[in-house]
Image (cartoon, rainbow, N blue to C red):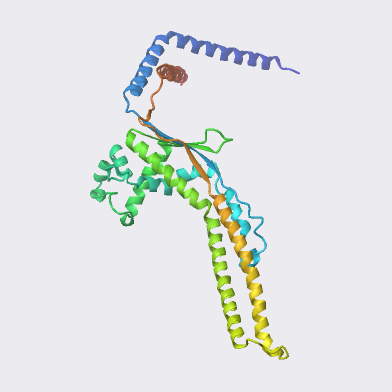
Amino acid sequence: MNDPRYIDEERISFRDFIDKVRSLIHYLLIHWKKMVLGTLIIASLRISYEVFRDTIHTAETTFIIEVGEGDMSQLGSLASVVGINLNSISDDSQLFDTDHIVELYKSYKMLKSAFLTRPGNGDSERLITRYAKGKKLLKRWHNDEELQDFSFEIPATDMGVKHDSLLIEVIDDFREKQLIIAKPNRKLMILSVKVEDHDPFFAEKFNTFLVEIVNNFYEKTSTKKTAENLRILQNQADSVRIILNHSLDQLAKISELQPNPNPLYYTNQVPFQKLQIDIEASAAVYEEIVKNLEMAKITHRNKKPLIQIIDEPVKPLSIDKARPLKLIATSGLIGGLFMLLFFIFKYVWRKLMQIS
């Protein structure tokens, strides 16, 4: 059974809510001129900042990766003999997919190698030194008493903990704000590497060296296991070849000592027969190893990934500047939302003060 008093309270509560909303709208309409003026001021400040801020140059490289594939299914008969897991050679196809390569581009090791590179062309400074100068980091470091004589222009083997700690600081900030690794199409093995910086020379060189360093590392790593198995197979082939040659030499010596052995004396035939058995066995093993070795060489070549550069940084580099209409629209929207929230907060605060 419904309580009439409860229904009345609900109606009063809802009516009270409507009255408060109307009061808020009325308050905003009274101050609409101030809101418009505030919006124009905020939008003007943002537009001025975008117009007069330092130009950001973008260096971009796009490339396609075709992962090599090798069929080792035919290399089975000798695997147990030489102690090699030939099936593991084909397992590297999943070692790197594009997601792994994206993380590789963001890794500390790869970025450190790029930062410590010397670009050449008469510029002997490492890229980290040029970057630190452009960001005013070098001046800040030298203001520290412990870093007054600090420099990255020393052999890499002489760099210590201070160099590593500063590199970590620089790389973390660079990775978050200036490095963009993307896969434009999830269905294609195409990657895009962008480097943004106020210095177009740094942006271009860092992009070029980073792509070269990472792609070389990827290529070597993806064929590392097949190269190791090839080395083991080659060593086994050389060892069996030595044993086979030794057995052939021994057989030749016995033949010289007993050119016409008497078939009635079986003991004279034993060394000769043992060597023949050893030679036949070694020859069979050697033939199988050589066959598998040649197939493994083909597989190793097929496992090598194909990295084809599509686009490289082109001078002059593209400039990150907002389009005028888009800039005006977004600036007005940001300013309007800020002023709206400001006056709503001001209205609520006044009401709370009246209650208290």
| Residue 220 located left or right of residue 156 | right
Please state which of residues 25 and 58 is positioned toward the viewer in this rendering.
58
- Visible in this render: residue 173? no
- Residue 259 lies, in percent from the top left, at 63, 86
Q: Residue at x 33, y 20 (%)?
A: 48
Residue 124 drawn above or below residue 342: below
Q: Residue 198 sits in which quadrant? A: top left
- Residue 191 lies, in percent from the top left, at 50, 37
Residue 154 drawn above or below residue 137: below
* Image quadrant where one finds the N terminus: top right
Please state which of residues 15 and 266 is positioned toward the viewer in this rendering.
266
Number of dots carrying numbers: 0
- Visible in this render: residue 246? yes
Q: Residue furthest bottom?
A: 265
Q: Residue at x 66, y 78 (%)?
A: 276
- Residue 342 lies, in percent from the top left, at 43, 19
Q: Residue 99 sits in which quadrant? A: top right
| Residue 270 located left or right of residue 171 | right
- Residue 221 lies, in percent from the top left, at 50, 52
Please state which of residues 311 and 331 is positioned toward the viewer in this rendering.
311
Residue 137 drawn above or below residue 228: above
Q: Residue furthest right?
A: 1
Q: Residue furthest front?
A: 260
